[in-house]
Amino acid sequence: MQAQAGDTAISAAGEDGGTRRVLRNEVLLVLALSLGASALSALISFIGSLTEPGGLRDQAATLNSSQAPGRPWLDLAWQLFGITSALVPVALVAHLLVREGSGLRAIGFDLRRPWPDLGWGTAVAAAVGGTGLLLYLGARAAGGNLTVVPENLPDVWWKIPVLILSAVQNSVLEEVVVVGYLLRRLHQLGWSPSRALAASAVFRGSYHLYQGIGGFFGNLAMGVLFVLLYRRWGRVGPLVVAHALIDIVAFVGYALLAGRVDWLPTA
């Protein structure tokens, strides 16, 4: 009987270790297929910017650029392809959460509370958006940030809709993967709340490093705030709304104001 009990304990320990190993591999694969690749690309881009003659503020980082200049319909096709393909990791996360018996509802990405999500998200966007703009302008003036060009799309009928779709895509991908999914998996792996918060925030900053030091630290701070709000509300819904509104204002605002106001840097 003692040997049988011992075998059961060893088997349980082995299953637990195997489960943890599977979860770790799953997290690494999801991140590698999504924003982990963006983080590595951002690091390489930042090194390139640092070694480029001249200061960071004299260089530009373009976010939404034309993929087929002079061919608007082909350009539109490429824009829509890029937006939809970037959401594939979100579909993968949804699949993985369904397989564990929960689904996206477990991280609060659903329509159970649309009006509170919209209200809280709008409030967060109003607070973070203005602060973020001031931090960007300050970092660029200090020489720690590239000039961020939110868009250089052609002036065609689909420009504003594509910018809005791009903003929504960014928000869904980042908040579902970097907040909801990552924090859930790190908790299941036994990470402490403070360690998981640091990992999520640093990761968010890392894939914005292509913008410069200011982009890294500004998004790191945003990552800390968003993790704290997620833990308070238990939902990524308000964070998706907030992020989408911040990016919509940045993208569409730049399209409407670039070259028309003196305080907005342009390339």
Image (tube, rainbow, N blue to C red):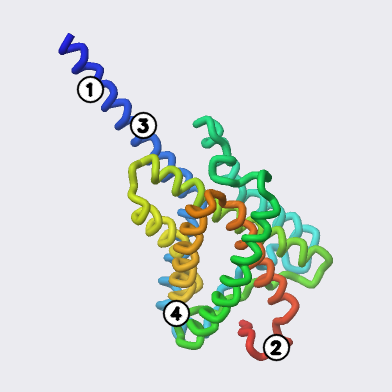
Question: Label 4 amino acid?
Answer: Glu
- 24 displayed left or right of 78: left
According to the image, label 1 marks what residue?
Answer: 10
Residue 108 placement (x, y as % from top left) = 58, 46
Q: Residue at x 46, y 74 (%)?
A: 212
Specify which label sits upstream in the sequence, 2 or 1.
Answer: 1
Residue corresponding to mark 3: 19
Residue 119 is situated, as x and y percent measured from the top left of the image, at 67, 60
Front-most of 101 and 142? Answer: 101
Can residue 182 be seen here? The reply is: yes
Mark 3 or 4: in front is 3
Residue type at mark 1: give it: Ile
State the separation of the CA atoms marked 3 and 4: 46 Å
Answer with the quarter of the image where residue 91 lies. top right
Q: Which residue is mark 4?
A: 52
Earlier along the polypeptide chain: callout 3 or callout 2? 3
- The residue pinned by badge 2 equals 261
Q: Position of residue 198 (x, y in %)?
A: 38, 59
Label 2 element class: loop
Q: 255 above or below 81?
A: below
**Residue mark closest to the camera, 4 vs 2:** 2
Question: Does residue 16 lie above or below 67 as drawn?
Answer: above
- Mark 3 Cα-neighbour bin, 10 Å: few <14, some 14–19, many ≥20: some
The alpha-carbon separation of the residues under discs 3 and 1 comes to 14 Å
The residue at the point 77 percent across, 66 percent down is 160
Position of residue 138 in the picture relative to residue 240 (left or right): left
Q: Residues within 10 Å of mark 1 (few under 14, many from 20)?
A: few
Numbered circle sitting on residue 256: none
Residue at mark 2 to residue at mark 1: CA–CA distance: 69 Å
Q: Nearer the viewer, mark 2 or mark 1?
A: 1
Q: CA distance from mark 4 to mark 1?
A: 57 Å
